[in-house]
Structures are given as C-alpha cells and as structure tokens.
Image (tube, rainbow, N blue to C red):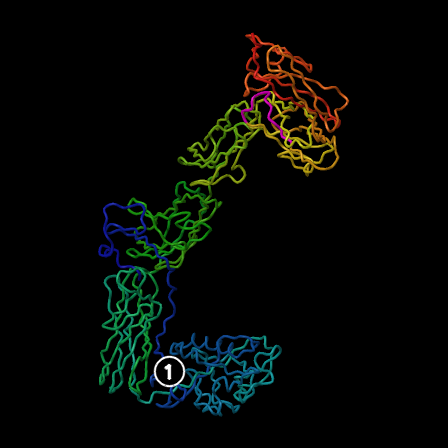
Amino acid sequence: MRVVPWRRWGRLLSSRSEASCSSSTVRFRLGSPLLPLLLGLPLAAGLGPTRAQAQVACTTANSDGSYTVPSDWALKPSGVAGGATFRLLFVTSTTRDATATDIATYNTFVQDRAKAGHSAVTDSCGDLFKVVGSTSAVNARANTDSESTDTDAAIYWLNGAKAADNYADFYDRSWDSAAVRDESGNSSSSVTFVWTGSYFNGTAHSSPLGTTTEARLGNIEDTNRPFSHLNLSSSKSYPFYALSPVFKVDSGSPTLTISGPASADEGDRDPMQRLFTVGLSSAVTGKVSYRVCFSGTAKLGSGSGSLAQDYRMESNGATVSNEEGCLSGLELAAGETGSGQDVGIAVLGDLFPEGDETVVATLSLEAAPEGVVLGTSVVTHTIRNDDGSKATLTLPGATTSLIEGDGPAEFVLNGSGVTSGSSYYVQFGLGGAATNRTDYRIEVRLDGQWYDVTGTAGSVLLAVGADVLPLRLRLVPLADKRVEGEESAVLTLAAGEGYTSGTPSSVTFDIGERTVAVAAAATTVTEGEAAGFTLTASPAPTGNVSVAVEVTDSGDFASGGTGARTVTVGTTGTASFSVATTDDDTDEPNGTITATVNAGTGYAPHSTEGSASVTVNDNDVAPTVFWEFRGGGIAENSGTYTREAIQANRDLGSALTVNYSLSGTATCGTDYMITGADCTTGTGAFTLPANTTAFTGVPFPVTITPDDISDNGETIIVTLTAGNGYNISGEVSTFTIYDDTGTAAFSLSGRPQVGETLSIVKDSDDPDGNGSRSFNYVWQFRATSSDDWSDLAASQRGCGDTTTCTPTHSEEYPAVGGYFRGRASYVDGNGLGTGAYTNAVGPFTLPAP
C-alpha cells in the first residue's frame, strides 16, 4: 500500500518527452510502469498479529494503587461487581532456570510473557505483572504487593476461575481452583511444578531463587502445596507464577471510550475514509480533552501519493503529530456525550499484494473533570489486502567480473506468481566492499532508455509494475583515482512490498582495477642516446586511458624530459615514450632515468612493476689533476701561503671536487689550517671551479699559525686521493714550516745614469744566520714606477747574476726613465729559503753630452 495506481502518476510526476539517462530523481512520461526512487531508510517491519479485543491502559493508578477497567473488559471475571477489585494470575507458557539472584530478572521474564499474551492486556498493564517468587533479598509477598497492608483483592486465573478470595486465602495452602491458565488465558493442564523459591506463606525459602545448587518449587496439581513442595537443581527449566496489579471495575463513572470501524478492503484508487468514534457514557459539567494515537502494522504517512504509507490521519481541526502518530487537542464540550464524535483516517489504496494490516487506535485523556475515566481505550481496524497473492522475485545468483571504468554488466529481475495489474515495492540490499555511487551505479531499462537509480550506500528501492517483469538492470563500474584492489558489489533482494524473495536472491559483481606496468626498452644506454619506456595496461582498455607518469633523473643526463607527463594508452593496451639524454664533455658518474606510474582515473599502478629505470653511462675521459709546485718552505710568520696550486690537464666544463689526505709532523688545527679540511679525520676536499682552463693552477691556500715554540722544520704533507671524475698524477705536495725572525739587509749604490756601475751591498746578516750556502744575486728592471719588475728586462740591459751591473740603453731595450733593483737569494740558518730586495734606483738618464 505504498503507491498510488499507475494511471494516477500523471498528477504526481512531471511529464517529459525525452528520457534522460542520468539524474538524481528519475521522471517518466505518463503511463510509465516503473518508478526508480532513492529512499535512504529501510522498509518498515513486516506484518504482525492483530489484536481484536478492547484493551485497558495502565497509565494512571487510582489513589489506592488500583487501575480502573470497564465493566465490559474481556478479562473481568464473571460476577465481579462495579467498584470491586481483583487480580489476575497465570503460569508462564515458557520456562527458564532459577539461577538469577536479582528478582528483576524474573519480573522481566513474566512481564514479557504478559505483553505477548492475551490481546486485552496492553503493554502498560503487562509491565506491572510481577513474579510470585522469592530471592534471598526479596519475598514473594513484597514483590507482588500482596502483604496484609496492601490493597486486598480476590485473585482469579487469567480468563479463568477464582484461585483465592484474598491474600490470606492465597497463602493458606489451599487454593480454590487449580485450573491453571497461561498468559493467553488458555488452559495449561500439563503444568505440574513451578519455580517459587518460597514457603507456603510467600516468604523466602531456605532454597530461594538464585541459589547455585537447588531452589524451591510449588506443585500446581496439589492445591495444598502450590508454593512449596520440593527442591530441584536451580539449573533446570520450569515455568513461573505471574500476578497482575490490582484492577478495579468501573462503578459507573463517566467513561470515555473509543470504537473502531469494521475491517475493509484497502482499495487501489483514491483515499477512503475510516472513522473511529469517541463517546462519553454520561455528560459532565466541564470540557473533556483527549488524544488518539495510531499504531499497528500499517504505515502512517503524511500526504497522498507517498510510496511509504498505508494511511494518513485526518485532522478535523486537531493538532497532527506525524512523528508520534497522534491527533491531539480533541474535545468534548461540557454536557456533550460525544455520540458521533469521529476521528478519521484516510486509507490509501495501492496495487501491492501484501498481507492484511492493522491500524490500532489508542485513546487517552489529556484533561477532564474529576471522575471521568477511560473505558475501552484501544481498538483495532484491519485493512484487508485486495491485490492478490505475493509474487516470488529472483536474481541471477551469478558472479560477474568487471573492470573499473569499463562497460556495464546487465542482470535481470525475474518474477513468478505475478498478478496482472499489481505493483511491487522492491528493495535491494547492497553489500560487499564496493560502495554505491562511489565505485558503481545501478541503472534500470525503461522504454528503450537507461535510467540512473541513485539509492543509498546500503540500499536501492524500486516501484515495479507487474507488466515490466522480467526487468532489465545493469551495474556500471565507476573509474576513480584510488588504489583499492578488487572489490565486490553484492545485490540481494531484501524485504519489500508485494513479494517474497525466491532462490537465487542475489547477484555479485567483482570490480577489479586495471593495472599499468612500466618497463625499460633497454636497461642501459650511453649518454646522448634516448632512454625508452613501455607502458602496459592489463586488461587492455576499451577506450583511451590517460596514464600519469613521473620521470626523475639521478645525475644530469636527461635533456628536459623530467617531471610529470601524461601518456595515452589505447585499446592495444601498450604505449611507449622516451627521454632524451645529453652527450656532454664532462666526465661524471653514471646516472639513471626512472619512470614511475602514478595513480589516475581508470587504472592503478602495478604493485611490483610500477616503476622502471635505465642506466645512463658516461662516455667522457676523466681529467688528470696534479700539484703545480709540489710544496715548498713556509715561514711560520708568513700568514696564508698561496703559492701552491692544483691543475688539471684539460678544460673543466663543470666544477670538480678533488679529495686529499693530510699527514706530516705539523698538527692540523694547531700549526696550520686548510679550508675544507677535517682535522679530525685528516682528510679534505678541494674544488676546482667550473670553466677552469687546462694547466691553470687554482691556488691551494695554507694558513700557518705562528707560536713561540721552537719547532723549526715541521712538515705538512698533502696527498691527492681518488675520487669521482678525475685521475691523479704527482699526488704529493710537502710544505716545511720554518721559524723566521728576519732576513739579511741589502742596499744598492751608484748613480741612476746609463754607463754608471751599480753595486749590491749587504748591509747586515740574517738574524737566523746566513746559512752555509752562498748568496745568489739577480737584477730586475721596470720601465715606469707602476710596471712589474722583470729579471729578463734587466738582463737585456746589461745586468747579469753578479753583485754589480752597468746598465745599457738602446732603442730596442731603452733604460732611460726606468728603474733598477737587486735581489739576493739564500738559505738562512734555519734552512728557510729567503729572498731580500735592495732599494730601487731611478729614473735613469743618459750621460751628459
């Protein structure tokens, strides 16, 4: 009863001349026999048993603790007069053990039985039944409010004879009747033993309920021993006595009652009204306010045309609460008895074959003058199904393999026992790791078009006309960028309307991922050759797939081909690409070019073949490096020594780092420092800059640390060691550190005139001694005071390697205007090679004519 007849859809849905193949809500042309819908909530529970009897609500107790029942109540014992009290006794139709120590456990047990029993017992009354049993902490008398101080009442078997006149009679070991009744009011003559845990007077036995060994039972067949007969193992299962609250028969107070309409067919067209009548037995001086709430197996809706309702409430000026299912604010005016005061529902016909369903109306007082009571407060109306028997629907039961982003797979919903003109409210439960609307979507075929059925992550709901069965559907796998492996989508027929699930009732789709692997065309190339790669998609796609690839370069060989790129793989399943390399003149380590497949839409990188590398071999000869001077003597007080240098035998296109080690008698960090050296390990690295030309020395500075220690002759030995990109020749340079306190002093005598003789004069000795070797002399000349001094220029003007020189002048080698000086070289007493210069003489002139 969820859907209006198909022929009424024209008033509910917008018409369209063209069907769209994808939408969140599918719309149809007039007369279409199928409505795919998205419904996020599961279907309501199935049909249950009806209660045909009038019921009493135990919501408000009288001042004495009793609950009023009408004189016509189905369970009122015969002969009980108005104003009299009584209680109902039954033995549970089901059994359990007696091991629980909490009396509440047994109370709940009998209350559940009471609520499941006779239709005249409402849940509110059923929840007030108590077990006639004792635990070590609670006596049966106290638990059932049957002490001498409690409101006394006769006790009757539920729907049966009287068992006791009052509480004293109940506990006197002699019941009036042993005609046992269960919670439904049926005879239970087969029952003998009943758990009580009590003595005959209703107090706790020495073997009460909740013992771990034995508990006390009564014997129902022996009216003298209904409470206390013998002990048995508490683990055995037996029934229990249950005693109702105290009921009081209405003594003629103004009584508000409700009556319901007779059972009727549901129909399949416009809503049909059903009326419940509320009446007051006698007029009162004030206004009576009441409410009516609806329950039962039929579904309450909020408007006509909804697929999820059987009926709706008719307000007639009342306050409507669809959430509670209630009509509130209903009134009977003062002096009004209410005959003809109707409360209505509109039964919404449908075409779903289904069982009969019930609408239970419950009447309750909101406000009334004192003395007004409720009589018959619960009535049931049955909506009879008139759409034939339920059909049996099935799904293929097969498993189909699909690939993300590829084509769909069809399946068919079949039906047997289909009633012509009927409709079916079909729900599919969605299981498996795959998620609807994320990993796949479901489509249905209608009038030659495919329509998207949105549904939820857990279910899809369709309204299906009998004339479209068998119905074509399909599952479309969706492409995404997530790497998730194979996932399954399982569609299973779930509870719906108008059908039962046959066998098979499910269909499974295994949705796999297309994987893309990458392989190198050749594992090794020489610089200047391209590095080739091939992508392979498995399985091959049905259309082009754009694959994201990341290219990286270890070294400096790739010629602009690194970074992200997109490679299109077609239906052949393979695609190739290459990365150019540069053939340079720089000797360098071999490198690699690596291609890695990144995640993308419609595929996933292969788990083990998602990347591939090509080795690029260098084809350049390494330069040879060597010392320019291979060491020398350094005065301790000379600061930074920069005369030594490292050279290479060919031009360097890029910077070259040369490794070295340190040794000798001098201590690194104390006697000297070299930039780039690690004094702890005795190693270092020195860089020849890019674009250094062949045989051009790059100064290797050594900074000497002066001290007051007499340590003349300490050595620094720097040895070039192997590294990447160079060879070694002449690998050792030795520096000797000498103590030095000064040099010998020299001066130059003579006039600055061509033809005059100049003499080098030693004015004082070296303070460290002049050494054992002779002094060596050389002359130097420069043309102006700003030019560099030159030994060669002096020899071209008549000066040799002696202490005297008579300068000459010629057109080729003019001396006029120039300057001369002398230099003396020697090894001092500490062994340090030393040089000293004289003063300069000039500018020179020609002799007078």
- The main secondary structure of the magenta stretch is loop
- Residue 408 % position (x, y): 39, 43
- Decide if residue 284 is on the left or right side of residue 122: left
- Decide if residue 387 is on the left or right side of residue 733: left
- Decide if residue 250 is on the left or right side of residue 676: left
Secondary structure, mark 1, is loop
Residue 796 in view here:
no
When the figure is inspected, residue 473 is found, relative to residue 218, above or below; the finding is above
Taking the spot 51% from the left edge, 87% from the top edge, the residue there is 141
Crowding near the residue tagged with mark 1, few <14, some 14–19, many ≥20 C-alpha atoms within 10 Å: few
Quadrant of residue 373 in the image? Answer: bottom left
- Judged from this view, the residue extending furthest toward the front is 849
- Judged from this view, the residue extending furthest toward the right is 772
- Residue 578 % position (x, y): 48, 28
756 or 772: nearer the viewer:
756
106 or 760: nearer the viewer:
760
- Residue 34 % position (x, y): 30, 52
Residue 588 in view here:
yes
719 or 3: nearer the viewer:
719
Residue 420 part of the magenta segment: no
589 or 845: nearer the viewer:
845
Residue annotated with mark 1:
60
- Residue 672 % position (x, y): 67, 35
Taking the spot 52% from the left edge, 36% from the top edge, the residue there is 611
Q: Amino acid at mark 1?
A: Thr
Residue 701 part of the magenta segment: yes
Span highlighted in magenta in the image: 690-702
Picture quarter with the C terminus: top right
When the figure is inspected, residue 142 is found, relative to residue 22, above or below; the finding is below
Picture quarter with the N terminus: bottom left
When the figure is inspected, residue 61 is found, relative to residue 270, above or below; the finding is below
